[in-house]
Image: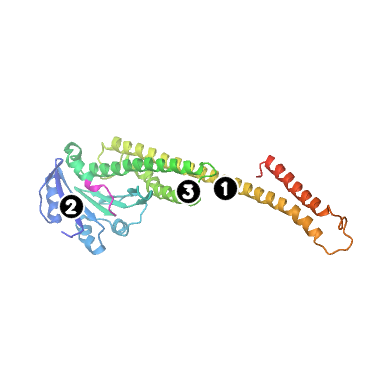
């Protein structure tokens, strides 16, 4: 088998069984058994590495192109010989409070499941282990695998949304901190947070239409009694999308509040600057007048003229100071 195939197993009546090492023979054996299917897991294959898988399983070229190039929106497509679904697992990094996404493609068809993973966070190993521990679920065939993968991805959306909610509460505390607190780079943090939420929405939002379709009857290659299970996944997805939309609205409100606070603080700073400039302007004006070289300045030769001018300037400045202080400018 190509090195990119990380796991290959036949499941008969919900239990893993040993099969041929060559997956072409394993697929033929699974189809011959009638109650079995082959599940192959592939990690970041190249076109050449995936070519044998494509030819043996009869995968549609357009779906194969999407699976190889990645960077796809979540979607569900039905072809003649297979069903193709794209999911985007979300990754939350607590150390940096950032959100990123990987990609996971699932092909299901006649007695087979092919999963193609891009990135390191897709929960395929955990899903496979959980299903192997629940043979009563796994015996429903490829549909059970598609359901379990969708359920794991969507449940993790809810977990990540909860982590982002905690981060948003910390950001709100910083924005509404007392005016003396350090609020530098707050706007940058808000915009960075909005980018994380946008990345989340790109993963969870487009998945709504495929989930609604899977929860409806008549989808080829999907077990006829699986609709209630996909409806449950869709309910969880709706909850996750509502949380993400709520985060986005709150972020917009927090940003507006921060900009308003910044404007008020700037106005307050301008009032203070204007008040100090006004107090400095009075003695400057008086000193400027007395600095003119005129012979007949009023009271120029009186002994008490100089201290009187000093008292006048000090009194004017003090009066302005009290006025601005009373109005809250200082």
**Disc 1 marks which residue?**
262
Dot label at residue 169: none
Look at the numbered disc 3 and give the secondary structure of its residue: helix
Cα gap from disc 3 to disc 2, whole angstroms? 42 Å
Q: Residue at x 22, y 45 (%)?
A: 126
What count of labels does the image hold? 3
Q: Position of residue 1 (x, y in %)?
A: 15, 59
* Front disc: 2 or 1: 1
Callouts 1 and 3 close, C-beta under 8 Å: no
Callouts 2 and 1 close, C-beta under 8 Å: no
The C terminus - image quarter: top right
Q: Earlier in the sequence, mark 1 or mark 3?
A: 3
264 vs 8, nearest the viewer: 264
Q: Position of residue 151 (x, y in %)?
A: 29, 41
> Is residue 287 shown to the viewer in this render?
yes
Dominant SS of magenta comes to loop
Residue 319 occupies which quadrant of the picture?
top right
* Front disc: 3 or 2: 3
**Disc 2 marks which residue?**
7
Q: Position of residue 165 (x, y in %)?
A: 41, 41
Q: Residue at x 40, y 40 (%)?
A: 166
Q: Earlier in the sequence, mark 3 or mark 2?
A: 2
Number of residues whose C-alpha sits closer than 10 Å to that of mark 2, classed few (under 14), some (14–19) or many (20 or more): some
Look at the numbered disc 1 and give the secondary structure of its residue: helix
Dot label at residue 190: 3
Residue 224 located within the stretch drawn in magenta: no
Cα gap from disc 1 to disc 3, whole angstroms? 14 Å
Cα gap from disc 2 to disc 1, whole angstroms? 56 Å
> Is residue 216 shown to the viewer in this render?
no
């Amino acid at each position: 088998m190509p090195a990119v195939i990380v796991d290959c197993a036949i499941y008969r009546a919900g239990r893993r069984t040993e099969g041929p090492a060559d997956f072409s023979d394993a697929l033929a054996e699974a189809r011959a058994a009638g109650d079995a299917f082959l599940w192959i897991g592939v990690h970041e294959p190249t076109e050449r590495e995936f070519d044998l898988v494509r030819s043996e399983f009869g995968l549609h070229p357009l779906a194969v192109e999407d699976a190889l190039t990645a960077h796809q929106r979540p979607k569900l497509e039905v072809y003649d010989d297979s069903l193709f679904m794209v999911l985007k697992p979300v990754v939350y990094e607590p150390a940096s409070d950032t959100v990123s996404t990987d990609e996971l493609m699932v092909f299901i068809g006649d007695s087979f499941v092919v999963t193609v993973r891009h990135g390191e966070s897709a929960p395929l190993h955990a899903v496979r282990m959980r299903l192997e521990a629940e043979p009563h679920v796994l015996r429903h065939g490829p549909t059970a695998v598609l359901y379990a993968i969708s359920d794991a991805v969507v449940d993790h959306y809810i977990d990540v949304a909860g982590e982002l909610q905690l981060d948003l509460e910390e950001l709100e505390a910083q924005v509404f901190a007392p005016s003396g607190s350090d609020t530098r780079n707050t706007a940058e943090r808000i915009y960075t947070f909005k980018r994380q939420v946008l990345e989340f929405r790109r993963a969870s939002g487009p998945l709504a239409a495929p989930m609604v379709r899977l929860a409806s009857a008549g989808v080829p290659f999907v077990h006829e009694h699986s609709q209630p299970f996909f409806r449950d996944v869709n309910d969880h997805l709706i909850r996750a999308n509502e949380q993400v939309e709520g985060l986005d609205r709150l972020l917009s409100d927090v940003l507006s509040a921060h900009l308003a606070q910044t404007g008020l603080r700037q106005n307050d700073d301008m009032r203070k600057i204007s008040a100090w400039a006004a107090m400095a302007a009075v003695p400057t004006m008086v000193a400027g007048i007395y600095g003119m070289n005129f012979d007949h300045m009023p009271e120029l030769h009186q002994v008490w003229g100089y201290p009187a001018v000093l008292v006048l300037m000090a009194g004017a400045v003090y009066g302005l100071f009290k006025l601005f202080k009373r109005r809250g400018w200082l």
